[in-house]
Amino acid sequence: MENVKTIWLRSESRPTERRTPLLPEGAKELMADGYNVVVERSDNRIIPNADYEAAGCEMVDAGGWMNHPEDAIILGLKELPEEPAVIKNTHILFAHAYKEQSGWKETLTRFTTGGADLLDIEYMTRENGMRYVAFGYRAGYMGAALSMLHWYSKQAGESYIDAPLQPFENADILDDTIAKLAVDKKKPKVLIIGAGGRCGTGAAAIYERHGAEVTKWDYEETQNLDRDAVAAHDIMINCAFIKSKIDPFIRMQDIKEGMNLSIVTDVGCDPFSDFNPVPIYGEPTSWDKSYIEVSGEDGTSLDLIAIDNLPSLLPRESSEEFAELMLPHLKVLRTRDQEQPWTSAKASFDEAVSRMNNS
C-alpha cells in the first residue's frame, strides 16, 4: 500500500469533458487534513484555474501526471490518453473496463505492468453492491432532457439536437429551452427502465416537470418483459445498472411497423459489453452526432441517443453534486486498505486482472 501524500487532479483529455470530481472548497479541506493537492491547469474545466490557485492548490501544466509524481494518487473522471503505455501511479476514474469492454485487457495491462491500481469509481460499492458515488441523477436528467428536446423539435420538422451539442451553463437555462420548444406540442408517453435508482429518479424529475406521461419500471417488470408495452410508448429511456447478461429491453426485431416508440435513450451506454440491454447499436453517439437512426427489417426506424458523458452537458450542477459525495472518500485515501469504498474498488480491479490473466 502506497503512502498517499498527494491527491493529483488531472486535466481531462476528452474535449467535451468539463466536469470535475474535486472543487476548490474540497481541496481546501483535503489540505487541512494534511494532503498535498496538485491541480493540472485546464481551460475546459467548468471551475476556473484561478479558483483552485486561490484555494492554495499547487498548479501544474496539463499532463503532468504522466511523469509519475511520487506519493500521488491521480484523480480524474473519464478515460486516459493512450500514452504512456505503462502507468505507475494509482488512478481513480471511470474506466469502463471490468465488464470486458473493448480494449479492457490493454487498459488493465497498463496498470499491472507499472505496478499500479486502477480504482474504478463505478465499483466503489457498499456490501450490498450499491454505489457510494455516481453521476447517475444528472445522467438520467440529461438523457431525459435530450429526448424531450428531440421529441418536441421533431414535431416542428427539425431537431434541436441535430447541431453539435453545447453544455448548458445551468439547469434553469435547460428548463427554459425545453419549455419554449414544448409550446403547443404533443406531450410524450415515456417509459423509464430502472426508475428506482439515482439515474431513473433524475429522468423522472425532469420528465414530470415538463408534463410527460411517465411509466416507471424496475427489476420486476423486466423479468418477463412486455414488449408490446415498450412499443406503445413514445420514448424509452434505459437507466438500469446492469451487472450480468439479461434479456434485452429492445432488440432489432422489435423495431417494426405499428410501434409508437420513436426515441430510445440509453443512459447506461455500454455497447461494447456483452451485458448491453439495448443491443441495437455498436458505439456511443457523441456531442457532434447526438443520435443515430436505427432501422428494423421492414424499414421502420427510431432515433437512438447514447452519449456516455451526459452529465457533462450540465457540468456545474453535476460537478457540485458529485464532488460533495466524493470528498469524504478522498479524505480517507491514506487508509484506503481499511475503507469499504476503496477495498471494494481494489477487489474489483484484482478480480478483473485475475480474469484477464486466466482468459
Image (cartoon, rainbow, N blue to C red):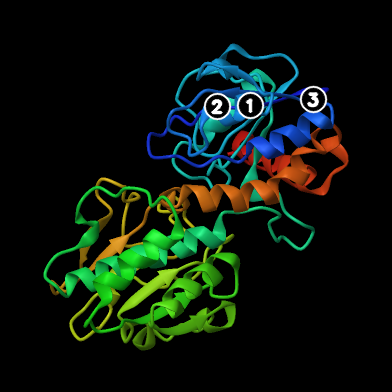
Q: Is residue 30 above or below residue 244?
A: above
Measured from the top left, where is residue 287 in percent x and y?
31, 47
Instruction: Please say whether residue 335 is visible from this viewpoint.
Output: yes
Residue most extreme to the top: 67
Q: Is residue 311 above or below residue 278?
A: above
Residue most extreme to the front: 54
Measured from the top left, where is residue 334 in percent x and y?
83, 31
Q: Does 3 sit left or right of 268 as displayed?
A: right
Q: Is residue 194 above or below residue 188?
A: above
Q: Nearer the viewer, residue 220 or 318?
A: 318
- Of labels 1 and 3, the one closer to you: 1
Measured from the top left, where is residue 342 in percent x and y?
76, 42
Name the residue: 80% across, 23% down.
Answer: 2
Q: Could you tell me the amino acid type at mark 3?
A: Val
The Cα–Cα distance between marks 2 and 1, rounded to whole angstroms, is 6 Å
Q: Secondary structure at mark 1?
A: helix
Q: Is residue 125 above or below residue 240?
A: above
On-image quarter of the N terminus: top right
Q: Does 182 sit left or right of 93 as displayed?
A: left
Residue 4 is labelled as: 3
The residue indicated by pointer 2 is: 50
Q: Secondary structure at mark 2?
A: helix
The residue indicated by pointer 1 is: 54
Residue 256: image quadrant is: bottom left
Q: Secondary structure at mark 3?
A: loop
On-image quarter of the C terminus: top right
Q: Residues within 10 Å of mark 2 (few under 14, many from 20)?
A: few
Q: Nearer the viewer, residue 25 or 76?
A: 25
Name the residue: 52% across, 37% down.
Answer: 47
